[in-house]
Image (cartoon, helix red, strand yellow):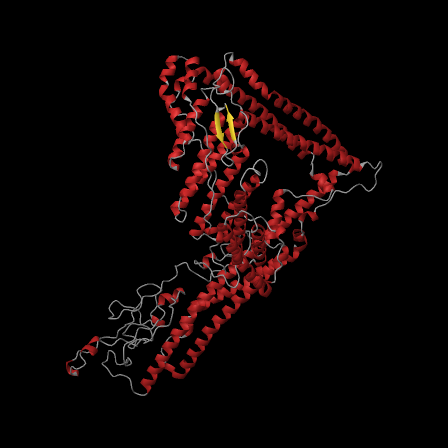
Amino acid sequence: MAASTSSAATTNLMLAINEKKTNSLDLYRPLRNYIALHYSEREARNLEDDLETVNQLRSDVEKSSDSPPARRDLLIKYFKCLCLMETRFPISPDKDHINALQFVWFDAFKPKNKSSQVNLYLEKAAVLFNLGAVYSQIGLSFDRTSVEGRKQAVHNFVTAAGVFAYLRDNVSVKAAAGGSATVDVSVECAGMLERLMVAQAQECVFETSISKGSTPGVCSKISRQVGIFYEEALAALNVPPLSQHFDRTWIAHVQLKSSLFFAEACYRYSLELHEKEEIAEEIARLKAGVSALSDVKRTRGAPAQLLDAVCKLEANLNHNLERAMKENDRVYLQRVPPATSLAPLPAFSMVKPMLLDEIVDASKEKMFMSLVPDSSTKALSRYTEMLDDVIRTQAEKLQQGSELARVRLKEMDLPDSLLALEGNATLPEILKEDVEAVQISGGPAGLEAELQQLRDLRRVNHELLVQTEELLQKEAQEDSHFRSQFGTRWTRPQSSTLTKNLLDRLNRFAANLKQAGESDARIERSVRDHSTLMSILDRHPIETALPTLAKPIMSLDANEDAIVGALKQSLRHLETLGAERAGLEDMLKEMKRKDDILPKLMTSTGSYEDLFKKELAKYDHICEEISRNIQAQEQLLMQIQAQNDQFAAIFNLEDFKASREKCFKQIEAAIAKYREIKENINEGLKFYVTLQDAITNVKQQCSDFVMTRNIQCHEMIEDVQRQVSGLSLQGNSSNQNYPYVREPHQPPRTMSPQQTDNGNISQPSRPLAPAPYYQPPLQQTENANVPLASRPQAPAPYYQPQNPSTPGYAPPYGASQGPSQQPHPPPYHAPPSSSSPYQSQQPHQQPPANYEYGQPAYPGWRGPYYNAHSQQPSSFPRPPYTVPGPYPPQQSGHYRPQ
């Protein structure tokens, strides 16, 4: 497999934008003359500092010697000044305005082209363009091999995108309205540059995702979005006015990047498909990536670094493609779908243009504050309120018209009845989603496979039970054999007294399995009984099961086609009216967005009310169009009602509706029955898997019990043989019947009374070594050379059986007498004692008190038929089957005894 990193992840080639150039311009004298003329000489003197500040900022903008961060701050400050000037100084060729300011700016991409206007919007557009260019240069200057460098690059690129978006949406149109503006500040170019900056920001995010080892699926989505952004920029570059304006290297760069990241997305997505073993789609995606790179390798003017990245990625794609095709030919044998049938690659945008509201907000600036008359501000607010009222009223009319059309068509069952006549009947959306969910989960045809899973799991559980019972039976037979052979010398308890709880639990498991088989049979009967009902869900597509609307068998005047044709024509006309309403609403919003009368208010010498009427009259023609649209729709709906009445009478529409509703109810009933059966099967699968874990646990306990009994059996045989041959150790009366122990061993792993009574036997990972029948006194080891007469007598036996102090507690192996009645304690069990010189091993953690594997899990129990969650608190093992199904198991009563 190719390395997880690929060419696109290491490509470090991006684009920055050069600033526009301008000619020198003096702002001080024309602005001061206007203030002195329209306000007063005193006001002009008071604003001397503001005028000098603006003039100095313009002079600094004309230079380009500052560092990019300093340049950025300068442009932002100057743009805020321009925003303040816009509302105070009317700059235009009008004789009553400031007409001595001629702004000249050269095109950034073709410096020979220039634009010259007496229009402040050209100045604002040029400053915004340069601000976006500076942000792009700052973003490109960071070292993107570090996390912090990539983070800073992303921030500056999205800010540059926000600047160009602001230029496109707020200034470009106004700049073009003042005369011939250069292409670089046009709406088309600003939109293209915004997409380019967003693409480079998303590319930095992709580099970050690669560096931190994100999953192939995540990398594929991010990479695909990079390609989409570059594709949008490329689309703008390939149409006028940009197609002949940019250098060929720009177009080649963007084209290569769009193809490169599309192929990168295919490569990453194929890695995820390979993990899922979806080999056919993996091959198709790899072929699509190779094809995209093959088409773009011959692009002229592309940088060598990008071409190297293309070659490297193409090699990785071809390597994985060759491997995948070999695996498919040898193992999977799946048909590779054509590229046209593949769903679009998923994409996820991690960046968006930054909003410039805070960056360019000049509301807090104090410059030229005294030049804003209160009357103009109040008049603008009044005009805005009037305009909002007009827009709101017309928008409500449009929305009411659309809602009325929708309700009336729903009442007439249109266009569903016409679609049914053409054989294109449709299901209600909710019902269609339910059918699709059933079909995705396998449908009724897939129930047999799940029933077979139930049978297999029941068989596996039965086999485990049989094996466990055979373990206990074999041990009991061996114990009985030695008991008959040695007679009274064989003093250990019988197996039946120790395995009662285990056998009871196995019997309960067997009863559970028997009841499970009965429930499985009920499920299979239900599947057979309702197969006809549920068969409708296997129809592909499901719409083929719906009734169709047919022409009448006998026709009196043969005008059915004419009626249908007229009804269709009316519906198309109604759809056209709806599209017109949507366009009228968008037109209203766009006009309001572009409507700025502040310059007119500040220069107006007449009545504001006359100006308001003149400005609002611009919206009269749209209001008239809205009224005509609503009236035309009302007449058309009346016409459609009459045509639909004729259509319903000829085609017997009422019977068709009844038949369709009947079919809908049948589908709903089939879905309900399928879900019920599916949920019951899922309960059964969960029950069997849980029961299998419980039986396996008990089987392990039985194995440990048998192993322990075998160890004790061997020790007792040796003890009995030594007693018979007279080799028993002779001691004092307190321990003379205990066998001699050559060397101490660890105590044997035995079952304590509590473990036997409760049925919870600890499960060590391996058998323990056999223990001695008793523990030798410490003095025998420490005083080996002391004469026998001077040695202390051996103490009492290491373990003395005691009468149980807790109700229900039995001595080991059934011993119930104290030392006086049983002088020879059984040598097979050594429970831990605080007085022993050797501590026994720490017992394994016992299951909780309510941990009972043998609880009945069928009728008569506390829950539904298949529900054994309380039998096993831990997660149950998955083999041999997992528990499928999109429908979560419900607590239904389907499995209760009938």
Say if 720 sits above or below 97 in the image. below
Determine the residue positioned at 71% across, 28% down.
Answer: 636
Say if 155 sits above or below 607 in the image. below
Q: In the displayed structure, does residue 811 sit left or right of residue 198?
A: left
Determine the residue positioned at 35% across, 80% down.
Answer: 716
Say if 423 sits above or below 839 in the image. above
Mark yes or no: residue 373 visible. no
Determine the residue positioned at 39% across, 20% down.
Answer: 369
Q: In the displayed structure, does residue 798 sit left or right of residue 186?
A: left
- Percent across and percent down for residue 884 are 54, 56
- Percent across and percent down for residue 623 are 61, 22
Q: Quadrant of residue 497?
A: bottom left
Looking at the image, which is closer to me, 226 or 576? 226
Furthest residue toward left:
790
- Percent across and percent down for residue 498 are 40, 71
Q: Quadrant of the C terminus?
A: bottom right
